[in-house]
């Protein structure tokens, strides 16, 4: 996508995005990009804060943009909780690490949509619109143990122990 046409790319009009990243400035940057795309954006600094935030909402986000390396639960573990609880939504993972490194460490699920930091505005738009077009919980199933066995932040407490 041409950077000049970015402002007219409103993939998120009438939709909600959740951004979870423990770096305030980067989380704010991603949130601003998603707002430019038309999303109503909810932000959290970690998995527990994200689940607590979502407990206060009447509906789930349409897309979640999650840092892979969060304190406590990882982004993929949080994605499992989100999908188990709310069902279908698009999920995009982001990290400064290379995707092959993360996959080899067993942290990033195969086939996951991934943005390597730093990225362009257009990269965010393309990734988010792609996962929203094909959102399906089976696409993002975490290969390991099920981390979310109950609803809300309780599942995060149990998983962290």
Image (cartoon, rainbow, N blue to C red):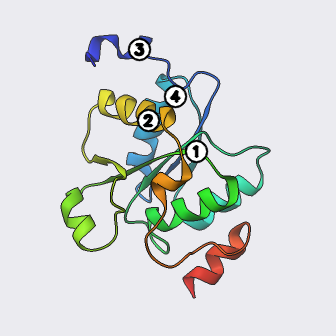
* Front-lying residue, 140 or 60: 140
Label pair 2/3, CB-CB below 8 angstroms: no
Q: Which mark is residue 89?
A: 1
Tell me the residue that label 4 is attached to: 35
Q: Which mark is residue 128?
A: 2
- The image quadrant that residue 144 belongs to is bottom left
Q: CA separation, marks 2 and 3?
A: 15 Å
Label pair 2/4, CB-CB below 8 angstroms: no
Disc 2 or 1, which lies upstream in sequence?
A: 1
User: Closer to the observer: label 2 or label 4?
Assistant: 2
Residue 97 visible somewhere in the drawing:
no
Give x and y (percent) for residue 16. 62, 35
Q: CA separation, marks 3 and 1?
A: 24 Å
Tell me the residue that label 3 is attached to: 7
Q: How many marks?
A: 4
Label pair 3/1, CB-CB below 8 angstroms: no
Dot 1 surroundings within 10 Å: few (below 14), some, or many (20 or more)? Answer: many
Q: CA separation, marks 2 and 4?
A: 12 Å
Disc 2 or 3, which lies upstream in sequence?
A: 3
């Amino acid at each position: 996508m041409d950077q000049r046409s970015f402002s007219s790319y409103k993939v998120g009009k009438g939709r909600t995005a959740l951004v979870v990243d423990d770096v305030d400035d980067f989380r704010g940057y991603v949130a601003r990009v998603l707002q430019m795309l038309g999303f109503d954006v909810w932000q959290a600094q970690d998995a527990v804060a994200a689940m607590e935030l979502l407990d206060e909402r009447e509906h789930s986000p349409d897309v979640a943009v999650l840092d892979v390396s969060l304190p406590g639960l990882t982004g993929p573990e949080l994605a499992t909780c989100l999908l188990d609880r709310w069902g279908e939504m698009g999920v995009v993972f982001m990290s400064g690490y290379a995707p092959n490194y993360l996959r080899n460490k067993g942290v990033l699920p195969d086939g996951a949509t991934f943005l390597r930091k730093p990225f362009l505005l257009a990269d965010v738009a393309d990734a988010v619109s792609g996962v929203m077009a094909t959102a399906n919980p089976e696409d993002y199933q975490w290969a390991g143990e099920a981390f979310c066995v109950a609803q809300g932040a309780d599942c995060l407490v149990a998983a962290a122990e």
